[in-house]
Image (cartoon, coloured by chain):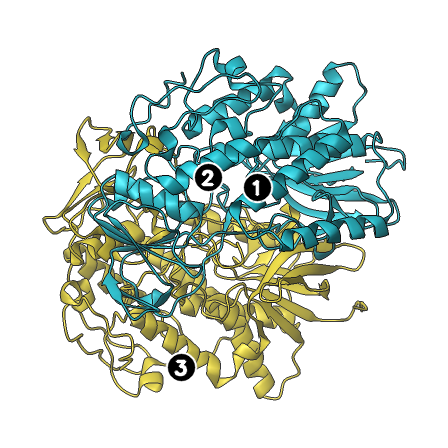
Chain colours: A cyan, B yellow
Amino acid sequence: MAHSKEMTRICVIGAGPSGMSMLYHLAKMEGQGKRIPDVVCYEKQPDCGGLWNFDWRTGVDEHGEPIHGSMYRHLWTNGPKECLEFPDYTFDKHFGKAIPSFPNRAVILDYLNGRWNTVNARKFVRGNTKVKNVIYNPDNDDFTVWARDQVDDKDLPPEQFSHIVVATGHFSVPNIPYFKGVETFPGRILHSHDFRDAHEFKGKNLLVIGSSYSAEDISLQCVKFGANNIVCSSRSGPMGFKWPAQIQERPLLERIEGQTVYFQDGTSTEVDAIIFCTGYKHTFSFLPDNLRLKTENTFYLPNLYKGIVWIKTGNNKLMYIGMQNQYYTMTMFDVQSFWACRVILGETTLPEKEVMEVDIARWIHKLERVTSTSQAIDFQTEYVMDLGRESGYEHNLDVKDIFDYWEEMKMESIMTYRDNVFKSKFTGTISCKHDKPFMDALDNSYDDLY
Amino acid sequence: MAHSKEMTRICVIGAGPSGMSMLYHLAKMEGQGKRIPDVVCYEKQPDCGGLWNFDWRTGVDEHGEPIHGSMYRHLWTNGPKECLEFPDYTFDKHFGKAIPSFPNRAVILDYLNGRWNTVNARKFVRGNTKVKNVIYNPDNDDFTVWARDQVDDKDLPPEQFSHIVVATGHFSVPNIPYFKGVETFPGRILHSHDFRDAHEFKGKNLLVIGSSYSAEDISLQCVKFGANNIVCSSRSGPMGFKWPAQIQERPLLERIEGQTVYFQDGTSTEVDAIIFCTGYKHTFSFLPDNLRLKTENTFYLPNLYKGIVWIKTGNNKLMYIGMQNQYYTMTMFDVQSFWACRVILGETTLPEKEVMEVDIARWIHKLERVTSTSQAIDFQTEYVMDLGRESGYEHNLDVKDIFDYWEEMKMESIMTYRDNVFKSKFTGTISCKHDKPFMDALDNSYDDLY
C-alpha cells in the first residue's frame, strides 16, 4: 500500500467493548456527516463482543490460538448494570422496560450489541483475523500490521496505518503461579480462565486460590451448583465476606502432597480440584518491545498519557483502551474511546511529552495514596470525569454513589447483594427483582432476554 | 548480524526428539573432529525433551503461550521400546540391564537424555525462547528469525541463518471439531492434549470421541483409575479391541442435549465428561505461508523431498524433521536428522527440483495403495531404510518384524499387550516383565528408573 504522510488510517485491535466503543464513535460521527478516516478492526474471535462471548472451548481455539474467553455459563454481572449503563443508549431504551440490576452474561452482550447496531459499528470488524505483528516505521511515522485470516489459513498482505489502537483486553492470559508439589496433584487443576460450568464440581472438595472477583464469584458458583466444600486461600488475607457454610478462608497455600494441600498456618485439607483465581497478565504477544505496555493490573498505567496514549514512540499515534484495573467498565472504555477519537481526528491537541510525563506521574502519585475501595472508586470516577470534561463527552458518567452503595451491599451479604434493586442515573428507572434470588437461580434462561 | 553468502548457520526450532537428533549428530561430528557450522536451537519450553516433558499446566504457559505438552502422568509407551531403540545407544547401554518393553514416560525421557548427554547436545539449546517469526530473504538466500526470551520478557535481536530446521512436532495443537449442542453440555469438555491424570474421572461416565492411539489409551487409563463407564464414538468405525466391560463402542456423535449424547445410530447415553481424542493439527504459527507445511497427518508429506526438504523456496535450505504420521519414532527422526545434516554440510547433493517432485509423487502414489496397518509399517520401514542407505547411516534400523508382532499382540489383547516381552535387534537382550501388569500398575514410581 502506498504511503502518504497525511494519511490517517486507524487499526483497532480487538472488537470487545473497548474496541467496539472506538468503532461506535467513529461510525456515529460518520452518521452525523463527519468525514472519518479509514478504519480496520482485527478480531481473533469470529465476532465482536470480546469476553462477553461464551466459548465452550478452553486452551486453544480451532486454529491453535489461545482462547480469549474467560466467560462461564452461569455468570451474572458482579456490579449493578446501572454502573455500566450508557447514557446515550440506556437499558430502558434497549429493553423497553425495567430489568434486574445484575443480569446474566447474555443480557449484557445483547445490550452491547444493541448499541453497536444503532450505528452498524460492526461493519469495520474483520473477524477470525489474528494480528501477528506490528512494527513502527520511524521514517514514515507509521505502522505496519501483519495479520492472518484464520478461516482461510492465510497470511494477509501487510497493511500500513497511521494509528494503532490496542483494545485486546487484559483478562485473557492467566497468571498461574507455581506451588511446591502441584505437579504431583492427581486431580483437576484449572485457572478461572478455563472455568466454564460449576456442575463439574458437584459433590467435590475444592481449593480456590485467590481473593479477588474470580475467587469470590467462582466459589459462590460452586456452592450454587452443589460443591461439597470450598477452601479459599490467599496471600492478601481473607476476603472477609459472610460466606455460606461450605466456604472457608485460609492463608496462602504452602505446598501440595498428593491430594493434601498445606497452608502457611500449618493447617491442611484434602481436595479434589484446585482452581487458580490468581488473575491475569497484560500480554500483547503481537507487539514488539518498543510498543508494548508492560504493567501490573493497576488503576493508572505507566507510559500512557491519560491512560491511553503511548508516549514512548513520541508520535502519540499508538493508543491503548481499557487497560486499567476497573470499577467503571463500559462507560470508561467509551469515554476513553471518544477522547482517543478526538485526538486522532485532530480535535484535541496533546501537550509536549514532558507535560504528559508529569501528568502521568501526578496521577500515579495520587493513586499511591488510595488505600480503600471507596477511594479507588473515587480515583477512577475522577479519571473518567477528567476524560469526559477534556473531550466534551455529552454526558456525566459519575456513578460513584451507586458503586459505594453496591460495595456496602456486597460487604453486608455476598450471597444476596445481587438481589438488590438500583436506580438508573440516566432514566430514573428502578430495576426490578429477578424471579429467583441469585443463589437459587440455577437455570438462567438465556433465551429469555426480558 | 553481517551476512555472508558462504555462511552456514543453522537454526533448529524445537528441542524435542527430532530437534535433539539434529543437535546430537552435529555435536557428535564436532566431537569426531569435524568442523561444524554455527547452530542455535530455540526451544519454547524451559528444557529439551519436547512432548516427553510432563507439564502440570494446561491451556497456556506462564508466558501466555499455548502449552506444548500432551503428556499425561501415567503414560506408558504404546509401542515396544525395541522399536524406538537407538543402535548407537541401546537401552542396555543406558540402564546396564534388561528393562521392560513398555516403560513409562520418565524412563523414555531419561533414556533420551542419556544419549543427548554423551555429546552434550544440549549446549546448543536456548530454552524459554519462542520463535515469533521467520522470513526468507531471496536476495541473500538466507532467513531472518525473530525470537523472544520468555523469561526476560524481551524480544531478541533478529538473527540471520542459512538453514532452518523445523522440529516443533505435530502433536501439540488439538483438533477439536464442533458437535451440535456441545456449547450446552454442563460437564467437563477436554481434548486429550489437556488430559493429565485419570483420577479426575473416577466414578464418572465418559464419552471419548476418536478411534486412534489417544482414544484407546485414554479409555484404558480411565478404566485403570476407576471410571464408571466409557463410551467411545468415532467416525471411522469401531477400534475393534477386546475391551473391558466398562468400555463400549458407538458410531459418531450426532448431537448433545444437556448431559445426553446422541449417536448416529439413534442411541444415546448420559455422560459426565467428554474427552476429544480427535487428533492434532500441523500448525506452525511462527512461519509465513511461503515456508509453511500444510498437511494432514499422513505417512508421506507434500512438498517435502524425502519427507524433509521444503522444495517450494527452491534453495533446499528449509527442512522439516518428524512431521510424518509415525510408527517409527526416535530412530526415524534420527536418520532424518543425520540425512539432513549431511545435506547441510554438503556431503550429499540434492537432485534438481523436478526430480525431487517426481520422487515425492512416487512415494505418495505408493502410499495410496497402503490399506492395512502392516502395509503402513512396511511403507515407513522402506522410507527409513531409504534414508539410511542414502546417508550412509551406520546401522540398519529395520524393526518391521517387531512392529508386526506388537500389532498382533495388541489386536489380541489391548489390556495385556504391554505385559509382553520383546527382543532387542541390536543387543539381543530380551526385556523383563514389569512388577505388575499394566492394568494393575497404578503407581508408576518415576524415581525408580531401573
Q: Amino acid type of disc 1?
A: Ile
- What residue is rendered at 80% in x and 38% in y? A162
Q: Amino acid type of disc 2?
A: Glu
Q: Position of residue B24 (x, y in %)?
A: 52, 77
The secondary structure type at the circle numbered 1 is helix
Q: Can residue A195 be seen? A: no
Viewer-proximal residue among A250 and A228: A250
Q: Are marks 3 and 1 on the same chain?
A: no
Q: Amino acid type of disc 3?
A: Tyr
Q: Position of residue B228 (x, y in %)?
A: 14, 48
The secondary structure type at the circle numbered 3 is loop
Residue B89's disc number: 3
Q: Position of residue B397 (x, y in %)?
A: 39, 72
Disc 1 marks which residue?
A377
Viewer-proximal residue among B444 and B101: B444
Q: Nearer the viewer, mark 3 or mark 1?
A: 1
Q: CA distance from mark 3 to mark 1?
A: 66 Å
Say which quadrant the N terminus of chain A sits in.
top right
Q: Is residue B60 left or right of residue B152?
A: left
The reply to whether the C-beta atoms of the residues labelled 1 and 2 are less than 8 Å apart is yes
Q: CA distance from mark 1 to mark 2?
A: 10 Å
The reply to whether the C-beta atoms of the residues labelled 3 and 1 are less than 8 Å apart is no
Say which quadrant the C terminus of chain A sits in.
top left
Determine the image quadrant of residue A147: top right
- In this view, B305 is above or below A374: below
- What residue is rendered at 19% in x and 78% in y? B432
Disc 2 marks which residue?
A407
The secondary structure type at the circle numbered 2 is helix
- What residue is rendered at 23% in x and 71% in y? B444
Count of labels shown?
Answer: 3
